Amino acid sequence: MRTRLVLLAVLILLLISTVVTLSSSLAEQVNTGVPRQSPEVVIIPTLRNDHQFNLDYTVAHLMALLNAIGPDAILVDDYTDWLRRECPWNTFYPEIHVALGYARERSLALFGTRTTPERTFEEDAKVAEKYGKTHPDVRAVEGAARRTLDARAARIARDYSFPGESRDLHVLVTRIFPSKRKEGDPREHAFHMRESKRIATEIERLLTRNSSHRRWAVLLRWEQALLVEDALRAQKPAQVVAVTDYLPLKAAAVEKQMDYKHTAWILAGVLDEWYGMWAPQVFPRERIAALLVRLKRHAPREPAAAFLEARWLMQHRDYGQAEPILKRLVESAGDAKFPFPVNGKWIRPPWSSVRDKARLNLAFVYDYKGEREKALELYRVLLDKGDRLNDEARAVGYIYDDIRAVVESYTKSPYTGIPEEAIRHFPIIARKPEGACKDR
């Protein structure tokens, strides 16, 4: 008899538990209209600065992928409070600007995996001062810069320009990233392990605090993306959806994103930045020429398109044809701006004004031709702008490239057209950001 009573009590408890669970589930369905589910998270491995060199995985491909995923929240490896001011702490990385633009255009939530910036203005000022003392001139920086630029230029050519096969995201994720992961330096792997744990913890916290967002796109450098995906699958704070579910991207979807803005952005990354000055031969000439044709088809009268054509000609030492294009821009470009976010990594110097960029490059042409007085006149026009030459040159945190010092250097020694010109762009300063980026 006692056994039957115990069994009956157990059955009653199970029944009560089931009723409570069903009631809770029904309440959720009444409140939300659907049964509550874990949010979906798609981890997108990025190339950071290498996006500008891999023509199979560019900013346009990233935008097409975000469109395919259709997130209602985006997360990047930056500081949330700076992102809210539309001002990334680290301006180097193209994917952060893509995410920022995508979220702005669609009024989506954008979060960072970091909360408190690593350094204050005072600390960055000390970094800039110390760097200035140890690198007082071009000669002081040339040795280390030459080795770094040579090594990276060779890697760019090997990995992206002449591999003989596509380097699109599907190939990268399914084959190349896993292979590189095994070959990586143990110290770098340990660093990425630490960072991935931090990022996974922050993602879990953000998912909990922002439960109304049902689909998240998380853009992370590929070494950490793989590790973060593993951690999230183990912790199960969300339903992790493999990025390969959205790959390969449809050609039409990518083509739609290859508009004037993205084509110009891609071209600036190979025609008007450090490696474009240092080793233009490492880039795939035929593909870049095709992109220039596309750009002129999109915007035949846009000053930015004409400027990039002039940069193409200068890279190939055709200063004669570049000169009249640059002259026209100086005379008629007016207030024309580049259509993409300027940045010291993919546009040197980082000025949004097409006319100012044309002035500087026309001065280069005059110096190259030996017409020094004409070149000096243009350098002085630019220097009349004073510290405004550095307004758009923020690199990371409170650190800026000192573009004014670079222009001043051209008044002391002329532009030569040789690869070492890239090394002139080394001075840095510390300052408080202006406008939307102003520190609070």
Image (spheres, rainbow, N blue to C red):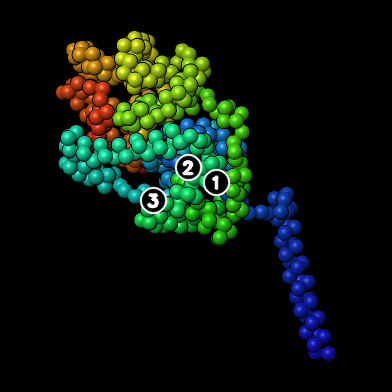
Q: Is residue 59 left or right of residue 136?
A: right
Residue appearing at x 49%, y 50% in the figure: 178
Secondary structure under badge 1? helix
Q: At x 37% / y 53%, what residue is drawn? A: 185
Q: Could you tell me residue 300's position as x and y percent?
A: 48, 13
Q: Nearer the viewer, residue 56 or 1?
A: 56
Q: Which residue is at a point 79% across and 76% down the rendered structure image?
A: 12
Identify the residue under disc 3. Answer: 116
Picture coordinates of residue 195, whole percent (x, y): 42, 54
Few, some or many residues within 10 Å of mark 1 (<14, 14–19, 20+) = few
The answer to whether residue 438 is above or below residue 261 is below
Instruction: Using the numbered discs, state the Cα–Cα distance from disc 1 to disc 2 in whole angstroms.
Output: 14 Å
Q: Which residue is mark 1?
A: 174
Q: Quadrant of the C terminus?
A: top left
Between label 1 and label 2, give the one nearer the viewer.
1
Residue hosting label 2: 46
From the viewer's perspective, is the residue at label 3 or at label 1 nearer?
Answer: 1
Of labels 1 and 2, earlier in sequence is 2
Q: For the residues marked 3 and 1, what is the alpha-carbon distance in whole angstroms?
A: 35 Å
